Image: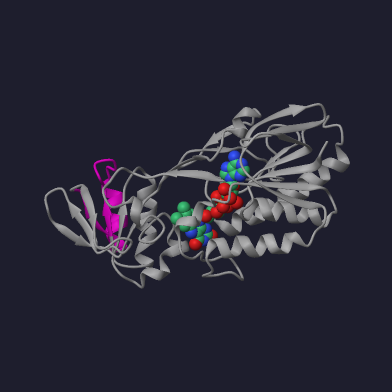
Amino acid sequence: MNHDVIVIGGSFAGLAAAMQLARARRSVCVLDTGAPRNRFAAASHGFPGQDGRPPQAIRAALRRELSAYPTLSFRDGAGASAMREGEGFRVTLAEGGDITARRLVLAFGVRDSLPDLPGVTERWGSTVLHCPYCHGYELNGGPVGVLARGEAALHQGMLLPDWGPTTLFTQGVLSLSAEQRQSLTGRGVMIEETPVAELFGTAPALDGVRLEDGREIAAAGLFLAPDTAPASDLAAQLGCTMKDGPTGPYVAVDPMQATSQPGVFAAGDLASPMANATIAAAAGVMAGNSAHRSLIFDPALTATA
Ligand SMILES: Cc1cc2nc3c(=O)[nH]c(=O)nc-3n(C[C@H](O)[C@H](O)[C@H](O)COP(=O)(O)OP(=O)(O)OC[C@H]3O[C@@H](n4cnc5c(N)ncnc54)[C@H](O)[C@@H]3O)c2cc1C
């Protein structure tokens, strides 16, 4: 085997996992394509000690720290396929060639699919957002909208008045009970049933949304829940059990971040129904520790890890 562990995905979760393994002097290879989920945002918020830093700067700092550990190596590129082989795994690289290891940590994140509405894509991560805790504060209390794509919009609609006067756009996909309307209006939320046709303003800034009947409603930010799916099908190739989350499928893990496949651990957005950078990093720490323990306590991979 080339390594004790291959970590596939080198962002918040993967680098946190790699650090635990490198600090145990284990041979670990981090394979990464350099496209973290929050790359569309100029700054990452809420990560303790890193609040407001650009995502790529945080990643660069983490990589710098890891470079001090001699048993760790980085390999830039995509894992294209992964399979069990003997008491370990073989990962084939998209650029050609392959590497082997006794354990895998999957940390390649998720891919977001946005609604096909004019003005959304060019504002993603700036004024079109999915998480008020990440970027709501920076809207400075201006008016905000919630673009319904399903039931999750009700939840967002209830939260958002803490960040600014809120309008919930039901978009013909959310039908509200009398009780739900009462809860929303109790929070001061305005409910708009005419669908949003487009966003306006000089992107990436947002001035508001234009409805199908031509009316304009001011908004400094628009929140929506993107559809998500693992950024790669490697977990499926390995036979990992998946679960359905509120925005899409994710890899099922136990509290130690072990997947259903012995020797395969997963952490971060791809293995969580709801995540952020801090939660991904914490899960990465657990996945790294668990992979290490598995090397010691289940060297032949006879039990579920
Ligand atoms: C627009 C936006 C803004 C956000 N802002 C914040 C914020 O301010 N604060 C916050 O806490 N959270 C924020 N988040 C959430 C945050 O981005 C994620 O929770 C976090 O990035 C998850 O970390 P991760 O390591 O699981 O995955 P990611 O950070 O997505 O990293 C996955 C890594 O795997 C790599 N990869 C993918 N496929 C492969 C492959 N086949 N082989 C090798 N490498 C691969 C990718 O290039 C990437 O580097 C934001 C999300 C979005 C969409």
Residue positioned 78% across, 62% down in the render: 68
- 73 above or below 236? below
Front residue of this view, candidates 46 and 69:
69
- 45 above or below 124? below
- Magenta residues? 167-193
Q: Is residue 192 magenta?
A: yes
The extreme bottom residue here reads 140
Residue 37 is situated, as x and y percent measured from the top left of the image, at 51, 51
- 44 above or below 300? below
Image quadrant in which the C terminus is located: top right
Q: Is residue 108 visible?
A: no
Residue positioned 75% across, 51% down in the render: 73
Residue 82 is situated, as x and y percent measured from the top left of the image, at 67, 31
Side of 149 relative to 228 (left or right) = left
Image quadrant in which the N terminus is located: top right
Residue 64 is situated, as x and y percent measured from the top left of the image, at 70, 63
